[in-house]
Amino acid sequence: MTEGEAMIETTALGRRFGEIEAVRDVSLQVKRGEIFGILGPNGAGKSTLIRMLCGILDPTSGSGRVVGHDIVREAERIKAHIGYMTQRFSLYEDLSVQENLEFYAGIYAIPRGRRRARVDAVLGQSGLGERRKQLAGTLSGGWKQRVALACATIHEPPLLFLDEPTAAVDPVSRREFWERIHAIAQGGTTAVMTTHYMDEAERCHRLAFIFGGALLDIGTPEAIVAKRHLRVAELDVDRAAEAAEILRQAAEVEEVAHYGHLLRVALRGASAESVTRRLLETRGIEVRSARESRATVEDAFVSMVRRQRLEEGER
Amino acid sequence: MNLRVMVIARKELLQLKRDRLTLAMMTAQPIALLLLFGYAINTDVRHIPTLIFDQDHSAESRDLGLRLQATGFYDVVGSVEGYPEIERSFRSGKARVALVIPPRYAAKLAQAEPTALQLLVDGSDSMVVASATNSAASLVAALSAEVRLKQIRRRGERVRAEALTLESNLLYNPDQRTAVYVVPGLIGVILTMTMVMLTSMALARERERGTLEQLVVSPLRSIDLVLGKILPYVAIGYVQMAIILVFARVVFDVPVVGSLLLLFALAFLFISANLAVGLFFSTLARTQQQAMQMSFFFMLPNILLSGFMFPFEAMPFFARALSQMLPLTHFLRIVRGIVLRGSGLYDLGAELLWLSAILALLVTLSSLRFQKKLA
């Protein structure tokens, strides 16, 4: 596989479970070395999509190739070239950190002579050296996550799948985890991860938005946000609850959220500040201060989901 | 391939080593069960495979054979020409009873000479012994009366003694102690219980903890997983067997007539087959609890149909067919043959084939069931 070639390529991929269409018509490409985020609410079909890409779940429609192999016909050939980690950190809790790593080193058939070196290397990279003898079950969430990632990368896979890898750990561990992911990606590894943390989404090179099993948008975080033409204002107002209600009634307002004593308002228009001031002051609510803020991936996502729900409601 | 089997097996052993409770259970359970199981229940045995050693070859001797068959207790499975042949058939379990008709049987009857028939009975099965001797004794008594009546009618003279007597000889377990019969069978029953349970949860546990999904996305092959999950537990089975044999000897005074080496060698197939049953259940169950229920349910036919409690010969056809599918049925014949009768490998060939076939079938089924795809 050469530089720039697609690690993953799907065409109209879909999966039904009986009546439920978990994933429909997803076409995407992931290039070598990318950190690719699949973003969506719970139940959007993110995990189903990842499982199809790993070759452990057959699609009911469409097709896909991963590391150059067909996901249906050559699923077993894909498996040697991918790493896979889920939020459950599927470790053997009654084995030590080192035993877990040695087990996966054996499963991925790393030659006996190189096994010890690989285990030592990932222990070092993950800062797990001192805990190598500790039983995995006695580790805290953050440490389990490190071990799980170390297990998933023991065979140096060119492609790493991470299914909500940070769902069960604290913010500090998440931050450290992301440092590791970026370090791994620097080495040429492609990482595909699902998440519903919006701040994490902004750390990805590219994003795919999944909602109701369908791909709503795909692109860099900046492009996705820019495309929505959202303006955001942070307001300090009198009677915040009442103000939020008024703003939500307005057609141009996409989203109103409470941030401490501030209201964060996302809308379409020339200036968030002037629009919100106008809306509120005509109703007799005092705006003590208002300032423009940067639209985030979260704003874009909420707006996208809202529009999708409106469309579905109309149908 | 062998490499990955070893990787799985090593992991299983490591986990077992840390699982103190299971380890303790695996040691205490066989001892407890062995001591708890009391007596097997006696039943009326029918269709006992029977040989006829006819040294007379007369119309009368053939008539005796037919009458024996007509009682319904005996199935005449062949006729032999000597004692060694009888012993061989007993050892391989082809026959349980042999009727020996003496030379000049017809002539002696005609001359009203007292005649002794001999009934050889495989004493290793107490229920067979009871039925076999009782019904033969009544048959011979009836026959004797009939012959006497004929003689009286024909000659009009008084007959001095009984025309016919039956002398029964038990070849094995002559004092008919239940323990001698039950304890070797218990080796099989206990191993079935513990081995099936041991693996029935193996995959279910990995499924519940999410590690199975991790294995499914790896290049591990199904057969590697299945064999890797079976082989390490064979060692546990051997330990249990040794414990029971020692107890059998010390507590119940059950002697081992045949080769222990052969018993341990053949037990490999039996232990593996039961582990494979458990693993197969494991591929069917979604949770450890379901797996547990299946292995309990599996014990029922094993206890009732294997010949442990009720003799194989007493079962209707469909039950016999079912019991042939149980590893325990065949192992019981092996263990009783070796421990009580001193059977050799040659005598147990059929059981060996059955066990191998069952094992191969289960390993194949489990490998097929363990799909490397999610549903």
Image (cartoon, coloured by chain):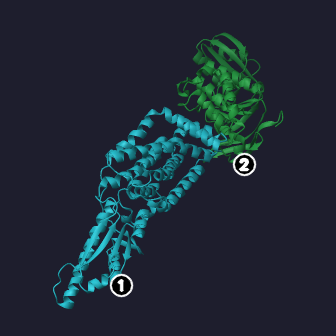
| Position in image of residue A26 (x %, y %) | 72, 40
The answer to whether marks 2 and 1 sit on the same chain is: no
* Apparent colour of chain B: cyan
Q: Secondary structure at mark 2?
A: loop
Dot 1 amino acid type: Ser
Callout 1: chain = B
Q: Is residue A212 visible?
A: no
Depth check, front residue: B172 or B211: B172
Circles 2, 1 touching at the beta carbon (< 8 Å): no
Of badges 2 and 1, the one in the foreground is 1
Image quadrant assignment for residue A78:
top right
Q: Residue furthest top?
A: A288
Which chain is drawn using green? Answer: A
Residue under numbered circle 1: B58
Depth check, front residue: A150 or B131: B131
Callout 2: chain = A
Report whether B328 appears left or right of A170.
Answer: left
| Position in image of residue B326 (x %, y %) | 46, 56
Q: Residues within 10 Å of mark 1 (few under 14, many from 20)?
A: some
Depth check, front residue: B25 or A264: B25
Kindly identify the residue that appears in the image at 40 percent across and 53 percent down: B300
Kindly identify the residue that appears in the image at 67 percent across and 15 percent down: A234
The label number, if any, that marks residue A234 in the structure image:
none
Q: Secondary structure at mark 1?
A: loop
Report whether A250 appears left or right of A140.
Answer: right
Residue under numbered circle 2: A73
| Position in image of residue B367 (x %, y %) | 59, 49
| Position in image of residue A47 (x %, y %) | 64, 36
